[in-house]
Amino acid sequence: MTGEVTLRGVAAEDLELLGQWRSDPEHESAFGDFLSLARLRNPYRERWEIDGLISEDEGILLICRAGEPVGGIQWHPVRYGPNRGSQALNIGISIAPDARGKGVGSQAQRLIYEWLFRHTTVHRVEASTDLENIAEQRALEKAGYTREGVIRGAQFRRGEWRDLVQFSRLRGD
């Protein structure tokens, strides 16, 4: 792999790029294609004006290789009980096709749990991926996540229910 992988916040000049990526099926990959008209609009500008696309509960950071943006990594809350302490953060990643297969994903997914544990009080960071997405499963394992099992019929994508593989990283791991 060439170039150091880093994460950085989204700047105003990055909003157009995020919108382009969102509407590009190649950038989202087959595993991120939900055939949604929502991806045709750019939802980032309005939210960026409010919080810069980062809060304790949800956010997005750019993945950069050698200083250039090649993707995004985001998080949102998942609750396992009624109190805030039972909240985990679920991450999702998208990487430009020409940056895939070079270790960018595993490095970014390690950096995001380090960032989230440093900047939030969350105890659990989790990720799930399609059962057929072997490359992402390997990237998560390489990044230090633990495979927990299969969540049957959890995601509706491209007109059918899909099984997901669940991974997690705990603050004490």
Image (tube, helix red, strand yellow):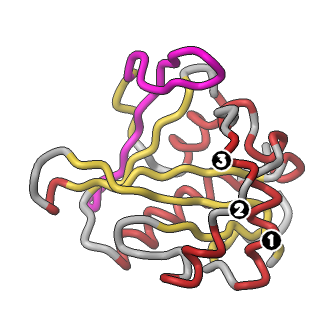
Q: Amino acid type of disc 3?
A: Ala
Q: Nearer the viewer, mark 3 or mark 1?
A: 3
Mark before the other along the chain sequence, 3 or 1: 1
Per the image, label 2 sits on a secondary structure element best described as loop
Q: Are marks 1 and 2 in contact (CB under 8 Å)?
A: yes
What residue does disc 1 label? Answer: 16
Give the camera-side residue of 27 and 24: 24
Quarter of the image with the N terminus in it: bottom right
Q: Which residues are magenta?
A: 151-173
Q: Looking at the rendering, which quadrant does residue 25 occupy?
A: top right
Q: Amino acid type of disc 1?
A: Glu
Task: Report the residue at 65% width, 78% height from top.
Answer: 10
Per the image, label 1 sits on a secondary structure element best described as helix
Q: Name the disc covering residue 42, or none.
A: 2
Give the camera-side residue of 20 and 146: 20
Q: Main secondary structure of the magenta part?
A: strand
Q: Pointer 3: residues within 10 angstroms few (<14), some, or many (20+)?
A: few
Q: Amino acid type of disc 2?
A: Asn
Asked if 135 appears above or below 151 in the picture, the reply is below
Task: Report the residue at 47% width, 37% height from top.
Answer: 128
What residue does disc 3 label? Answer: 38
